[in-house]
Structure formats: C-alpha cells, structure tokens
Image: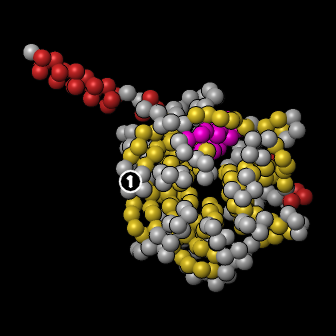
Amino acid sequence: MRDIHKYIIIFFIILLSYFTPSYLFSADMNLIASLSGNKIMGKFNQPSAIFFDESKKRLYVADTGNNRLVSFDPDFNFISEFDAGGELKYPMSSVRNSKEQFFVIGGTEKNGLFVIDISKKVFKQFDIKDAPTRENPILPGKLAIDKNDNLYITDKANGRILVVDSNGRHLKEIKLENKLVDFSDIRVDADGNIYSLSTLERKIYIFNNKGVLISSFGKMGNKVNEFEFPVSIAISPNGFIYVLDQHKGSILTFKKDGVFQPSFSNYKWKNQGELYEPYYIFADMENKVYIVDRGNNRIQIFQGEK
C-alpha cells in the first residue's frame, strides 16, 4: 500500500510540473530598475535596442520614435541625449567601440548604416568596403561588436553576417552553405564565438571565431523549451543564452549545448516586472539583463545570478 501511495505522489508531482506555467519555475532574476523617462528627458517612444558600454559603465538606449540615443549612468540616472543635430532618424540598433565611436542602423528607411563620432562632431554614412557581392544589395539589420572593435552586421537581404573593422574594411562573411537564413539578432562572446537567432526558423546558430558553424538548436512549439516567436538573444557572463520570445512574453534560458534552463517572466499588461511585446534583450558582464519592453515604452532591468 505504501508503494502505491508513493507512486501516486510521484505521478501528481510530474503532472503538476507539466501543467504549471513556465514562469513559476523562475530563474533567479530580480527586477532592479524600470526606465520609461522623466521630465528632463521626456518619455521613451518605441525604443528598439540597448547597448551597455563596459568600459564607461554607461547604458545607451536607441529611442527610435524620438530619433535619438539616450545615455544613463551605472545607477540608471539620465545623462544626455544625442540626435546628431536632428539628422539621426529612427535608430534601430547601435553599438559603441573603444574609440568612442557609435555605429547605428537607422535612417528614414530604417536600414541605413551610420557612424557617429561625438567628440569630432561627425555623423556620416558608414561604408562597407570589399564585401562579397551577392544577389541583393546589403540590407543591415542588427549590430554586435567584439573586444577588437570589429563589427558584426546582419545582412537581411542576403542571409549572412558581415564582419568588418571600424573603418569598414571587410574581414569575413558568415553564411550557411545553400541556405538563406534570417539572422534576426546577433551577439559575440569574449572568445569571439558568434551567436545568431533565426526568428523564422525558431533556431539558434553558434559559430566559432573563424565563422565555422559549431552547433544549432531550437524548434517551434508551445512547450516551455520551444519557441513561438523569438526576437532577440543575449549571452550571460556565466555562459547562458537568453532568448526573448515576444509572443510568450518570456525569456527562455539555455546552456551553450542547447539544454533548456527554467525561464522567467510572464505575459501581462503594464505590471511592473512583466513584459508586453518585448523587443530586445542584452546582458552585461555583471549579468544585469536589460529588456526593451516596447509595448510599455520602457526598459526593464533585472539582476541575474552572478
């Protein structure tokens, strides 16, 4: 009889774990700040991306609807805004190099590539030199940068990633043979490994620092470890891959080998710490996780395990 009771208890535990929403199996993430604007800077309007500068300890937000980049100090106090004298339009993705140059995808068509040197008061188009010619003109989507200031640019029109130096000189092309992939987001870790997300395929691709594919994982579905509509990825300092799923309103966490870890957050409207139409995710070296909560016009900042 005792054995029967034991098996009944085990059965109900398994059943409960299967039907309980994934956000109740919460990773150790705590909300530490929520940025939506103030009287000095005004309110965010459809922000699209963020970048945390580890050397300066500054947070930069691409405030797309307001045609500007906005900076914050380590305590998330507003510092300044930059709009290139009104020339910067619809910034969609941005990074900053060690020479204090910003690279921005935006413009009136939202796919131009520009370089900003604030100290020299330079704002101009950034030209990619000697990239392999493909069927379509280059159509920049998202940006990443490595420790050597090399830029990684997703080319939406040709299903590839272009790697160039800070002067635009082409270094390498990353592309899957005989396959057109919508590289919709990209990150580079400290070792130069490249992580890219394909939203349409619901898949993560990982390349080594030579641009050689070493692994891939992910599939579409409504299980806790499957994707509905993933839109952005981040790499934590302890080696986890965070995938932001817009339709789930959740972050799915994986090890580099694709093994699923408990996700956190759930889909609700305007509650503090919860997400509505999340758009972009970024993790800094202290494992602070920044989420562009676009449906609420704010940036949500969580502290993850260090």
In the displayed structure, 89 sits above or below 159; it is above
Residue at 71% in and 44% down:
46
Q: How many marks?
A: 1
Q: Position of residue 154 (x, y in %)?
A: 58, 66
Quadrant containing the N terminus is top left
Residue at 55% in and 41% down:
304
Which residue in the structure is indicated by mark 1?
Answer: 258
- Determine the main secondary structure of the stretch shown in magenta: strand
Q: Give the amino acid at mark 1.
A: Gly
SS at mark 1 in the image: loop
Q: Position of residue 114 (x, y in %)?
A: 75, 67
Is residue 183 magenta-colored? no
Can you tell which quarter of the image residue 4 is in?
top left
Q: Is residue 183 visible?
A: no
* Crowd rating for badge 1 (residues with CA inside 10 Å; few <14, some 14–19, many 20+): some
* Residue extent of the magenta highlight: 289-304
Q: Position of residue 189 (x, y in %)?
A: 54, 62
Quadrant containing the C terminus is top right
In the displayed structure, 146 sits above or below 246; it is below
Residue at 54% in and 76% down:
173
Taking depth in this image into account, of 231 and 180 the one nearest to the observer is: 231
Q: Is residue 145 visible?
A: yes
